[in-house]
Image (tube, rainbow, N blue to C red):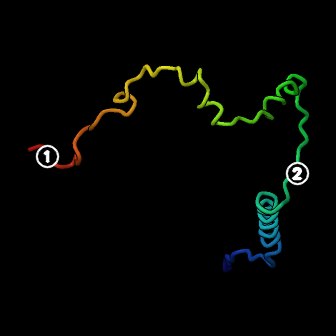
């Protein structure tokens, strides 16, 4: 009596192909909604306290009026120009070259 061992062969690969198709469809839908779908606009109603700030955004400022103002010109500078510009030189020009 002979023992015959054979691998069980699947008749079709329909289930594997269906799983791959579902996977690709999910990927395609995700790519569409992330990159190509039109953005939905959201209507935001500002609070009532913010409505009182609206006139501030409508103010126009002329720089000549500010710099030409007598009060602005009477202000003194309390920081010396050397401190405002920073130190003249910091460190060596090339830190990779050994000091001589």
Camera-nearest residue between 38 and 65: 65
Camera-nearest residue between 13 and 49: 49
Image disc number at residue 71: none
3 is higher (above) or lower (below) than 33: below
Q: Which residue is mark 2?
A: 40
Q: Tell me the residue at 90%/24% (across/down).
A: 48
87 is higher (above) or lower (below) than 42: above
Q: Tell me the residue at 76%/60% (across/down).
A: 35
Q: Position of residue 66 (x, y in %)?
A: 63, 30
Label 2 CA crowd tier, 10 Å (few <14, some 14–19, many 20+): few
Quarter of image, res 8: bottom right
Q: Which residue is mark 1?
A: 98
Q: Which structural element holds mark 2?
A: loop
Q: Is residue 12 left or right of residue 78?
A: right
Q: Earlier in the sequence, mark 2 or mark 1?
A: 2
Label 1 CA crowd tier, 10 Å (few <14, some 14–19, many 20+): few
């Amino acid at each position: 009596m002979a023992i015959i061992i054979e691998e069980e062969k699947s008749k079709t690969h329909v289930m594997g192909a269906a799983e791959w198709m579902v996977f690709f469809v999910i990927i395609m839908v995700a790519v569409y909604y992330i990159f190509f779908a039109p953005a939905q606009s959201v209507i935001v109603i500002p609070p009532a306290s913010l409505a009182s700030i609206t006139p501030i955004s409508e103010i126009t400022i002329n720089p000549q009026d500010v710099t030409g103002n007598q009060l602005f010109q009477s202000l003194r500078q309390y920081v010396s120009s050397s401190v405002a510009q920073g130190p003249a030189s910091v460190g060596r020009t090339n830190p990779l070259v050994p000091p001589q």
